[in-house]
């Protein structure tokens, strides 16, 4: 077979088969997420950026809520002229997505006029609307926090009876579940309220720079726009602060490397006043800054620092060690800001004409205006809120497990959100009638087969894209959010036939060259395999993996652009990084020595 | 005529003296004054050339004959060039010129053994301030003795009457009486590494990057295209190196024992090694920015690092001419409503 003569086409959706033996688990996903014959006519790509691992039945709520909100904002709220929303399908636990473009010029013209009335209003009133957004988000978080813990007492408490509440605890259960779900869908609407407009304003400046300075690198443009005090950097800043506190209070000896969280806390408690003082500081940092997930927040098992202190404590010990070695952990924000101003001014000076300078000034002003949202929203949405949401579902799981629906509270995540509601109604009914719920006969077998299917699917590589490659990828959402362009698809298609089999190309995210042993990390719990000096190879890196950035020599990812948060954080740490390789995790073998050239965007497999 | 009328040291001259020291000489003086390291040297001014040509004109006309040539008449031009260059070679230097060269060379070597020098043509005309004469006149490298240097000065002068050079002037209708030749005499750099640098991209004209090419040995191998040089693209402002292509460099130019240049193989362990470290690239970038700022326009630079030295020397810097002459249309304009810029992203097929 001649690998060079390949049709410019990925496999059709209909040729992608459910892995034998997992059919029932596949059938659990809602009918509207199953591929149909008509889907062969469209182009789809695997969203490994957001959903790098097979998704359990419940976790698909994230795809559903996110695409529902993204589509509503694009299609009907801001009326993006050339694009509507994004459809999604699930097969073997993998989420494939496809954009809906608007191609009729007359319709584009109508939508364009609407877009100006809507989006331009947002740009003109950005600060006010963003302040309002933050207040909305904090209120939403507060509401979620104040939802009652789901429980069913043997008898309705007397206080409720005397107060004439008029609804019993089983109804409160139902109400809490619906509010939990409603809040999550609402959060995703908030998430997308500004997102595309923010990215679009940034991309406008980005493309101007690429035209004015054809050889400027992506990361230079990112440096001109990125801020240094976004909420997403705060958790790591808090760790630095706590490390300094430990040294100042003289309790730094408690932070021995390899000591467990319990050992460290026990040791601090023996340190009297100073130890108590530090633990008080820890509480201050935890609320809210430890509401940050170790993953992207899209899976129920991406637990937050607050739920598992081992991650922040491991980096705390490392930071204490660095302080004691004489290093300053201070991030020189003012210096970084001055550098940014200098770079912006110097590039401005290089522009050829006054017209260019006037346009540059307007575009960078707009980019700076929108960027606090682009950088900041993730903490509130993907981390803080998502964490509250999954923990609330976990509480329902605990209640159902206690009533014998399945062995473990975590099993609740093997049910879709519809099924979980039905289980809750089942329990609600049983509590009210005094009979036994039916769930314990129904769910355990299904939970077991779905868990088994997830394990099988995780071992099954899936195609990066499906269907015929479109001539142009003209959907600004897909280009901006996933970095998918005609060029990147061509690169994926020719991945196995390039002139140099040992070279993998991606997006230059952070300059620097490093060599080391590749560690393919596809799930969060594999991160402990990384040894000092290893090179992380993953589907997508996450900014909250920052603590391991101290340990690794470089990072390579399948998906991501130079503006992905991973790229921003990699630059912060000066960590060579190549993102958006398409298939680095399958072409590189675990344990191979590789060289990462983050300035050129090239990964070389060394033999 | 006093020696300072004939000889100008780099530190004492600049571009304003172009009519006396030529474009190349003025540029080296200008660089020296701007604090850029160049190999030390002096310029034999156009006055020396005038003294010499005066003697020739007294025998039979030179400039008048050149000016009467038709720009298209290559036959006549070739004929005249041969005759004039023979006359240049046969005519001795005026004694004061000959002495001035010898004394300046002695001062250049500063009491040490005579080091090799480069003898370079540095032509000038009153008729066009920006006439580059690039590549039209001769340069002689590794000139070893005073006698050789004096001979090479006459050769440089004679190269003003090469076919290419005369044709260049005839096409532009320069007045011959306004055309003269100064000669730069400069210590040779026994280069460990040498190359060129453009302070904007030669590929795209991008002003925000510098392109550097370099290889082992003397720069003539790079300039003459005899080796595929290492190549770097470095961001002018941030110093980020976005391209670092290390090629296989099989040969290098070195000074030949008898004078001139010879081509020798590059030792195997150096063939695939970068000829400049990243730190050196950053030094070059700083130098390039300084020169560009000094002149206020993009530069085309030749540089070298001497054996056993860390210092980067500039051999030459001249204005970049390809992109600079292109009128650049603005990439963008201010919009009445700044928000409307985003339509380039959201507005439809681009």
Image: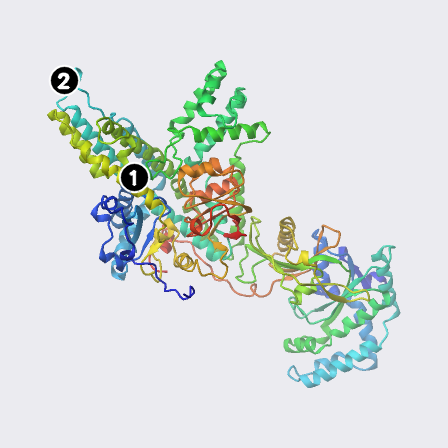
Report the side of B295 relative to A587 (left or right): right
Q: Is residue B145 visible?
A: yes
Viewer-side label of 2, 1: 1
Question: Residues under labels 2 and 1: Cα distance?
Answer: 42 Å
- Per the rendering, the mark at residue B201 is none
Q: Is residue A81 visible?
A: no
Q: How many numbered discs sit on the rendered protein?
A: 2
Examine the rendered structure and indicate whether residue A511 appears above or below residue B331. above
Q: Chain letter of disc 2?
A: A
Q: Nearer the viewer, residue A365 or A493?
A: A493
Residue A320 image point, x, y percent: 53, 27
Examine the rendered structure and indicate whether residue B292 appears above or below residue A368. below
Report the side of B141 relative to A436 (left or right): right
Report the side of A273 relative to A470 (left or right): right
Residue shown at the point (72%, 53%) measured from the top left: B37
Examine the rendered structure and indicate whether residue A166 appears above or below residue A363. above
Q: Nearer the viewer, residue B215 or A234?
A: B215
Q: Mark 2 highlights which residue?
A: A161
Examine the rendered structure and indicate whether residue B60 appears above or below residue A101. below
Residue A20 image point, x, y percent: 28, 49
Which of the image's four quarters has the N terminus of chain A? bottom left
Q: Residues within 10 Å of mark 2 (few under 14, many from 20)?
A: few
Residue A317 image point, x, y percent: 51, 28
The single residue placed furthest to the front in the displayed view is A21
Helix, strand or loop status at disc 2: helix
The single residue placed furthest to the left in the displayed view is A433
Q: Mark 1 highlights which residue?
A: A451
Report the side of A434 relative to A455 (left or right): left
Q: Residues within 10 Å of mark 1 (few under 14, many from 20)?
A: some
Q: Quadrant of residue B90?
A: bottom right
Name the N-terminal-most of marks 2 and 1. Answer: 2
CB-based contact (under 8 Å), mark 2 and mark 1: no
């Amino acid at each position: 077979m001649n690998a060079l003569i390949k049709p410019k086409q990925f496999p059709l959706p209909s040729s992608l088969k459910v892995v034998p033996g997992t059919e029932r688990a596949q059938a659990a996903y809602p009918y509207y997420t199953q591929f149909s014959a008509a889907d062969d006519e469209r182009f789809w790509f695997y969203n490994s950026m957001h959903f790098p691992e097979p998704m359990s039945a419940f976790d698909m709520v994230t795809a559903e809520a996110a695409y529902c909100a993204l589509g509503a904002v694009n299609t009907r709220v801001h009326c993006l002229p050339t694009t509507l929303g994004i459809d999604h399908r699930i097969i073997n636990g993998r989420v494939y997505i496809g954009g809906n473009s608007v191609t009729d010029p007359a319709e584009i013209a109508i939508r364009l006029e609407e877009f100006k009335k809507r989006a331009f209003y947002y740009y003109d009133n950005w600060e006010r609307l963003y302040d309002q957004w933050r207040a909305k988000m904090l209120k939403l978080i507060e509401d979620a926090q104040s939802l009652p813990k789901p429980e069913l007492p043997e008898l309705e408490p007397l206080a409720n009876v005397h107060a004439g509440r008029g609804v019993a605890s089983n109804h409160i259960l139902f109400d809490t579940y619906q509010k939990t779900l409603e809040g999550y869908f609402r959060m995703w609407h908030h998430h997308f309220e500004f997102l595309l407009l923010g990215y679009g304003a940034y991309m406008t400046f980005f493309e101007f720079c690429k035209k004015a300075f054809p050889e400027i690198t992506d990361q230079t443009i990112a440096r001109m726009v990125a801020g240094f005090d976004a909420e997403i950097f705060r958790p790591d800043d808090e760790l630095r602060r706590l490390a300094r506190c430990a040294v100042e209070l003289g309790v730094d000896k408690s932070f021995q490397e390899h000591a467990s969280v319990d050992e460290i806390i026990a040791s601090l408690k023996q340190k009297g006043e100073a130890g108590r003082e530090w633990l008080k500081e820890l509480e201050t940092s935890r609320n809210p800054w430890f509401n940050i997930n170790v993953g992207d927040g899209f899976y129920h098992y991406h637990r937050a620092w607050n739920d598992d202190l081992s991650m922040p404590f491991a980096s705390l010990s490392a930071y204490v060690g660095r302080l004691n070695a004489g290093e300053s952990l201070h991030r020189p924000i003012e210096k970084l800001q001055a550098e940014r101003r200098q770079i912006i001014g110097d590039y401005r000076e290089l522009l050829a004409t006054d017209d260019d300078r006037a346009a540059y000034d307007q575009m960078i002003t707009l980019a700076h205006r929108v960027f606090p949202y682009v950088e900041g929203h993730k903490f509130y949405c993907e981390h803080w809120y998502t964490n509250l949401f999954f923990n609330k579902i976990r509480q329902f799981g605990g209640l159902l497990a206690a009533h014998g629906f399945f062995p473990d509270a975590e099993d609740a995540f093997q049910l879709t959100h519809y099924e979980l509601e039905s289980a809750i109604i089942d329990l609600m009914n049983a509590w009210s009638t005094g009979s036994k719920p039916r769930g314990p006969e129904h769910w355990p077998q299904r939970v077991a087969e779905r868990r088994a299917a997830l394990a099988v699917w995780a071992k099954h590589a899936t195609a990066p894209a499906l269907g015929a490659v479109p001539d142009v990828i003209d959907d600004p959402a897909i280009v901006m959010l996933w970095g998918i362009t005609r060029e990147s698809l061509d690169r994926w298609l020719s991945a196995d036939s390039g002139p140099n089999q040992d070279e993998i190309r991606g997006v230059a995210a952070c300059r620097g060259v490093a060599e080391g042993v590749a560690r393919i990390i596809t799930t969060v719990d594999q991160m402990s395999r990384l040894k000092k000096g290893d090179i992380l190879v993953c589907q997508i890196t996450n900014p909250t993996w920052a603590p391991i950035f101290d340990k690794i020599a470089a990072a390579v990812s399948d998906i991501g652009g130079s503006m992905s948060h991973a790229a921003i954080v990699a630059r912060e740490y000066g960590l060579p990084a190549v993102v958006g390789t398409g298939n680095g995790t399958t072409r590189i073998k675990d344990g191979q020595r590789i060289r990462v050239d983050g300035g050129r965007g090239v990964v070389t497999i060394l033999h | 005529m006093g020696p300072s009328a004939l000889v100008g040291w780099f530190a004492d001259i600049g571009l304003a003296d172009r009519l006396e020291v030529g474009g190349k000489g003025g540029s080296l003086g200008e660089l020296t004054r701007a604090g850029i390291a160049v190999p030390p040297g002096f310029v034999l001014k156009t006055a020396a050339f005038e003294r010499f040509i005066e003697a020739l004109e007294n025998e039979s006309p030179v400039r008048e004959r050149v000016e009467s040539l038709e720009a298209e008449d290559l036959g006549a031009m070739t004929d005249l060039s041969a005759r004039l260059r023979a006359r240049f070679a046969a005519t001795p230097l005026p004694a004061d010129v000959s002495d001035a060269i010898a004394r300046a060379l002695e001062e250049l070597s500063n009491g040490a053994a005579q080091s090799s020098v480069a003898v370079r043509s540095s032509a000038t005309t009153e008729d066009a301030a920006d006439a580059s004469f690039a590549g039209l006149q001769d340069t002689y490298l590794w000139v070893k003795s005073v006698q050789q240097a004096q001979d090479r000065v006459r050769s440089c002068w004679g190269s003003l009457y090469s076919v290419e050079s005369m044709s260049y002037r005839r096409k532009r209708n320069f007045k011959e009486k306004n055309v003269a030749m100064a000669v730069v005499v400069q210590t040779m750099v026994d280069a460990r590494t040498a190359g060129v640098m453009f302070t904007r991209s030669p590929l795209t004209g991008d002003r925000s990057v510098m392109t550097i090419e370099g290889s082992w040995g003397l720069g003539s191998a790079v300039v003459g295209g005899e080796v595929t040089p290492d190549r770097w693209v470095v961001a002018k402002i941030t110093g980020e190196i976005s391209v670092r292509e290390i090629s296989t460099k099989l040969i290098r130019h070195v000074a030949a024992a008898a004078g001139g240049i010879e081509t020798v193989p590059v030792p195997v362990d150096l063939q695939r090694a970068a000829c400049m470290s990243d730190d050196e690239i950053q030094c070059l970038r700083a130098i390039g920015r300084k020169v560009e700022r000094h002149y206020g326009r993009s530069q085309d630079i030749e540089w070298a690092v001497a054996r056993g030295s860390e210092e980067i020397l500039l051999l030459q810097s001249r204005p970049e001419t390809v992109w600079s002459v292109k009128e650049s249309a603005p990439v963008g304009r201010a919009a009445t409503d700044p928000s409307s810029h985003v339509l380039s992203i959201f507005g439809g097929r681009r």
